[in-house]
Image (spheres, helix red, strand yellow):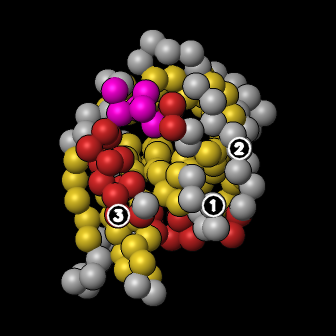
Amino acid sequence: MRIAPMHRHLSLLLLLVLLAAPPAPFAEDSQDVFGSWTLRCADQDGRPECILFQNLVLKTGGEPVLQFGVGRVPPDTQPTVLLSLPLGIALPPGVTIRIDAGTPATFPIERCEPDGCRAAMKLRDSTAQQLAQGRQLEITFYDGARKPIKVPLSLDGFGAAFKAFMAKTG
């Protein structure tokens, strides 16, 4: 599994805005659910801007713990993964993702903002295929004392959601 880091902060900010937006009331905007994944699209100047994502929130209080999203960062057409992580985490160890029992891949945490820390990477075709065929995505980051926090995300519905994402944004 290989995902290359991205450093286009302005474009990533646009992805974050779409990801954070509440479900839109306008007819040209849509939101579809595929298992554990949500595909949100908005019409931007006649072309769809879409984000495929899963949020993980605390059972008590509903506070966000992690957000895993896939979108496109113009002008590049290759999908980009954007991870939103909580504040107060250790940055130097980075973040590690592992699909099922596969080989873990570690990436840098690029920056922290008032609402959380961010890591972004290109989504390679082979990794998208692994996600589509997988059962669980494990994301590991580290708390302030550098103790690992392992967060499982269900991959239920990812294959169908990613196919719909590619069809709408292709």
* In-image side of 31 versus 68 (left or right): left
Q: Position of residue 51 (x, y in %)?
A: 42, 60
> Which of the labelled discs sits on residue 168, or is there none?
3
Q: CA distance from mark 2 to mark 1?
A: 13 Å
Disc 1 target residue: 76
Q: Secondary structure at mark 1?
A: loop
Farthest residue in the top direction?
101
Identified by mark 1, the residue type is Asp
Residue at 46% across, 23% down: 99
Q: CA distance from mark 3 to mark 2?
A: 24 Å
Q: Position of residue 127 (x, y in %)?
A: 50, 32
Identify whether 119 is placed above or below 43.
above
Q: Secondary structure at mark 3?
A: helix
Mark before the other along the chain sequence, 2 or 1? 2
Residue at 50% across, 15% down: 102
Determine contact: label 2, label 1, CB under 8 Å. Answer: no
Determine contact: label 3, label 1, CB under 8 Å. Answer: no
> Which of the labelled discs sits on residue 5, or is there none?
2
Mark before the other along the chain sequence, 3 or 2? 2
Tell me which segment is drawn in magenta: 128-133
Q: CA distance from mark 3 to mark 1?
A: 16 Å
- From the image, give the main secondary structure of the stretch colored magenta: helix
